[in-house]
Each structure stands twice: as structure tokens, then as C-alpha cells.
């Protein structure tokens, strides 16, 4: 039997060396790999769904070829990966993941992890400042979905505690009243949050969008008035800064005006887009008026998953929602730094050291490099849009606001109807993925099936942009 004693330092070094070698081999060959493995579910199961050995394998358990096999059955985020909204994972950040796991801090409170808590609070403040929300606090989360849920939970508690009558307060806190407003293009994590908050099927109203996929402010205003008149209780407005389908940015300043006029909490879902304010702040005017804002460093800050973030203006609002501290966890100090506990401002208690990879990679590359990579992604999206416009058999389906391009193959005008075009483009997408050079995903834009390329990838080069067009045309010829 191989006991759980730590390996000797020499053994640890040798094992770590094997892992680093495998990782370096992966990175060194990343551009030559197919973007998605040619493997069936059955094959993957046969390969990896094996019984855990009763007797340990020792070093063989993590020898390079085992890890290489894992990589061989994995999606690869090389320069041609343009699906969904996916940050590519900076190698320096990955080293931070390893080191953070070795020192294994539980980032609950300052007294549990002095360095980790200090670094996280500092990085969060820096991110807030970088996107135009100077003075905001917050925490790193498992992703935008959790950040959105937490922001809306804070909104509800803020309303509940502001309620005049006790009865009203209880209704809101119990989730029986309260309506959230968001655009028709809102990310699925918002309806999920409304459901988890117990707001019921009428707890989320999706507001019409304009021709640029942005929330129509007049329709928002009308919906709030209608709900008020019907005795419902408006709770929060969610503005999206970068919709997942097309990258549209709701008119933040106008939406903030409406929210302020009606005394409503403003949450901004910036999971995809808000970090874009580092490169193009002029597109994000009004972000600083949010009460809470979610953003995802594992998207457009190129961090490995998972690294989301919730920012908020007022830490007291976070504590109102999340401080339920039992005696066993209560801090014994009044010191504002040493007494700080993330768990009093977050849904999470045990938390890993998410800030270390982020902090190391920001220090290593510097903010200017991140801004440059983002600008490059914005330019790549424009370049792809231009290429699509040049091709007679392709057409753009939405304006390119940030780094998403939605387009489709439309043929040479042989008069296929909408359902035919949708089916044909779905088939083209499947062929493109099978060919393995670039990875696109899909979206529905005004009811039409769109091929979708999202540039949040620090590895993408002009040849990858060109390959998108070439691959779609090649796939159209055989699909
Ligand atoms: C990705 C995304 C989310 C969800 O974030 P996760 O980190 O995947 O949980 C929410 N909103 C938008 C606009 C997104 O792009």
C-alpha cells in the first residue's frame, strides 16, 4: 500500500517535473492540434471510465502519456477557438493555479488566509477601477452565473429592508413579490437566478430590444409603470454589457436613469463584455452607476476557469444579504482589515485562491498587454465582419459591437426559405467543427440560425480570422 504521507521533496519535484513537461509539450503543440477531438462518447467512456485501483500506481498515475491522453480527448483553445465566450487560459495563470493548490488557502476570511484575502481584495479593487467602478468592492466567484445570482439577491434584500410596511418586507424577502427587468437578449443565468430567488414565472420581464439588440428604454419604463399599476413590486433592472449572442450593450446611462427614477437596484451583467472597458471605455459609459456588476475574468481577461467576479458599490448591502455568521465563525477582532470575512459578503464560504493566477498574470504581463490583446480581439471581429461582407455567399446577421460576429451562409440566391437556411447553416457548423481547424458556435439572431465567432482569445492571429471564412465556405461546399 502507498500511504497518504507526502512524497519526499525530491519525489515531489520529480512528479511536478513530469507534469510540467506534459504541460509544456501541450503548449508547444497547441496550434497543430485539432480544435475538437474526433472521439465518440462511447470511446471516451471506454478510455476513462475505469475502476479506481485499490493499490496505488505511484508515479505511473501521472506520467506524461496519461496526461497527453487526457489532452488528446479535450477541446483545445488555440487561436482558432472562437466558440461561446471562452477565455483561453494564460500559461502564467496556470502556474498560479498549481502554486495556489499547493499552499491550499481557504479564502474565507483574513484570519484564515492573510495573503490570499489581501491579494484578492486588492485585485478586485483594481478590476473595479479598471472598468470605471472605482471604490467598488466585491469578490471573485465561480463565474458570472453565481455573481448574477448574488447581485440579484442583494437587490432583493435591499428592497426588503427598505420596505415601509413589515408585511411588504416579508413578501419581498419571501420571494412572493418582486419583478426583475432585463432585455429579451439576457443570459440564461438571469432567469435561473430569478427562479432560485423564488420570484416565480412572472418574476422576470424580458424587455423588447431595438435593431441593435439593445434594451428599448421606453419599453422598460412602460413595463415598470404597468407592474406598479397592477400592484406588483419592481425589484431590479438588469442591464447587459455585452450580450452573449451578439455582444450588444444595453444603453447603460439611460437604463441607469430609469432605475434611479424608480428607485430600483441596477445590476449590470458584464460577464462577457464589461472587461472590454479596459480597451474601449467609451462604449461602457454608465457602468459606474451600477449597484452591482458581474464580470468574468475567465472570459475576456484570458484566465483559466473558474474566475468570475461580483462588484458592488455598497459592502453593507452585501452583508445584508450574506452575513449569517454563526458563533463558531465570528471574528474576535474589531480591526477592519483583520476582521474582514468574504463569507459575510458572499454566498460562498470555502473558497479557493482564485486571485493568485489572476494576480500573477496581471503582474507578469502588465495591464497594457491585456488592453492590447483586447483591442486586437476587437479588430479581429471587425476584420471578420469585413471578410463576411466581401463574400457574396455570406451575410452578417448583427452589427459588431464588441468582439462577436454573427453571420450565415446564404448561398448564391437559389431562394431557400428560412427553415432551409437554418438547417443548412446548422449542417455547415457541424462540418466546420468536424474539420477541426476553427471552432465556432451558434446563436439565434431575430429568429435566424447564426454562425457565431467570439474573439476573447489571446492566441488568435490573422490567419485564424481568414480560416473562419475559408472553413465555412469549404464546409458549405460539402454540407
Ligand atoms: C458567460 C456569461 C454568463 C455566465 O457566466 P458563467 O461564468 O458561465 O457562469 C452570464 N452572462 C453573460 C452575458 C455571459 O456571457
Image: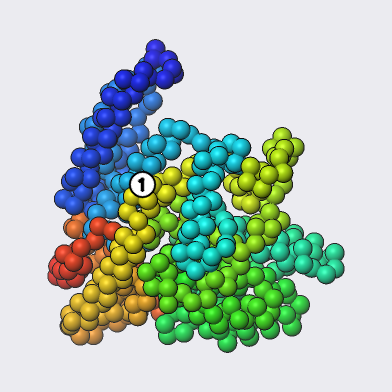
Question: Left or right: where does residue 467 sit relative to residue 257?
Answer: left
Quadrant for residue 24, please give it: top left
- Residue 78: x %, y % from top left: 24, 54
Say which residue label 1 marks. 93
Question: Left or right: where does residue 187 sit relative to residue 419?
Answer: right
- Residue 361: x %, y % from top left: 36, 50
- State the quadrant of the N terminus: top left
Residue located at (42% from left, 32% from top):
102
- State the quadrant of the C terminus: bottom left
Residue located at (55% from left, 38% from top):
113
Residue located at (18% from left, 66% from top):
462
Look at the image and tell me whether residue 261 can be seen: yes
- Residue 374: x %, y % from top left: 33, 65
Vertical comparison of 170 with 250: above or below: above
Question: Left or right: where does residue 30 sit relative to residue 304?
Answer: left
Vertical comparison of 353 with 419: above or below: above
- Residue 121: x %, y % from top left: 54, 51
Amino acid at each position: 500500500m502507498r500511504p497518504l504521507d507526502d512524497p519526499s521533496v525530491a519525489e515531489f519535484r520529480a512528479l511536478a517535473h513530469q507534469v510540467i513537461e506534459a504541460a509544456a509539450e501541450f503548449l508547444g503543440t497547441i496550434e497543430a492540434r485539432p480544435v475538437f477531438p474526433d472521439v465518440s462518447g462511447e470511446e471516451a467512456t471506454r478510455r476513462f471510465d475505469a475502476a479506481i485501483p485499490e493499490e496505488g500506481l505511484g508515479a505511473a498515475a501521472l506520467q506524461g502519456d496519461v496526461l497527453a491522453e487526457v489532452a488528446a480527448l479535450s477541446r483545445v483553445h488555440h487561436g482558432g477557438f472562437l466558440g461561446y465566450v471562452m477565455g483561453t487560459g494564460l500559461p502564467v495563470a496556470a502556474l498560479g493555479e498549481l502554486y495556489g493548490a499547493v499552499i491550499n488557502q481557504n479564502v474565507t476570511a483574513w484570519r484564515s488566509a492573510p495573503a490570499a484575502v489581501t491579494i484578492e481584495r486588492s485585485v478586485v479593487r483594481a478590476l473595479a477601477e479598471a472598468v470605471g467602478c472605482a471604490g467598488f468592492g466585491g469578490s471573485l466567484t465561480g463565474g458570472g452565473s453565481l455573481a448574477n445570482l448574488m447581485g440579484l439577491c442583494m437587490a432583493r434584500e435591499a428592497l426588503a429592508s427598505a420596505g415601509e410596511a413589515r408585511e411588504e418586507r416579508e413578501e419581498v424577502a419571501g420571494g412572493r413579490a418582486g419583478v426583475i427587468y432585463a432585455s429579451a437578449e439576457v443570459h440564461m443565468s438571469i432567469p435561473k437566478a430569478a427562479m432560485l430567488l423564488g420570484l416565480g414565472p412572472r418574476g422576470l420581464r424580458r424587455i423588447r430590444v431595438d435593431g441593435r439588440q439593445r434594451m428599448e428604454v421606453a419599453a422598460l419604463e412602460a413595463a415598470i409603470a404597468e407592474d406598479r399599476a397592477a400592484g406588483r413590486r419592481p425589484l431590479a433592472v438588469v442591464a447587459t454589457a455585452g450580450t452573449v449572442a451578439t455582444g450588444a450593450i444595453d444603453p447603460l446611462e439611460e437604463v441607469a436613469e430609469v432605475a434611479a427614477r424608480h428607485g430600483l437596484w441596477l445590476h449590470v451583467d458584464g460577464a462577457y463584455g464589461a472587461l472590454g472597458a479596459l480597451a474601449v471605455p467609451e462604449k461602457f459609459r454608465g457602468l459606474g452607476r451600477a449597484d452591482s456588476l458581474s464580470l468574468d475574468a475567465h472570459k475576456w481577461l484570458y484566465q483559466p476557469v473558474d474566475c468570475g467576479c461580483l462588484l458592488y458599490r455598497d459592502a453593507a448591502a452585501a452583508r445584508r444579504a450574506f452575513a449569517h455568521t454563526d458563533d463558531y465563525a465570528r471574528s474576535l477582532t474589531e480591526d477592519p482589515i483583520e476582521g474582514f470575512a468574504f463569507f459575510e459578503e458572499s454566498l460562498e464560504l470555502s473558497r479557493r485562491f482564485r486571485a493568485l493566477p489572476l494576480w500573477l498574470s496581471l503582474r507578469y504581463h502588465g495591464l497594457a498587454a491585456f488592453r492590447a490583446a483586447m483591442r486586437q480581439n476587437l479588430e479581429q471581429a471587425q476584420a471578420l465582419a469585413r471578410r463576411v461582407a466581401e463574400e457574396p455567399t455570406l451575410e452578417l446577421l448583427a452589427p459588431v459591437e464588441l468582439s462577436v460576429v454573427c453571420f450565415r451562409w446564404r448561398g448564391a440566391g437559389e431562394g431557400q426559405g428560412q427553415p432551409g437556411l437554418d438547417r443548412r447553416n446548422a449542417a455547415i457548423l457541424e462540418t466546420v467543427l468536424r474539420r477541426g481547424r476553427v471552432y465556432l458556435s451558434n446563436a439565434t439572431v431575430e429568429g435566424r440560425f447564426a454562425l457565431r465567432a467570439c474573439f476573447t482569445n489571446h492566441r488568435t492571429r490573422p490567419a485564424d480570422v481568414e480560416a473562419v471564412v475559408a472553413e465555412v465556405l469549404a464546409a458549405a461546399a460539402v454540407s
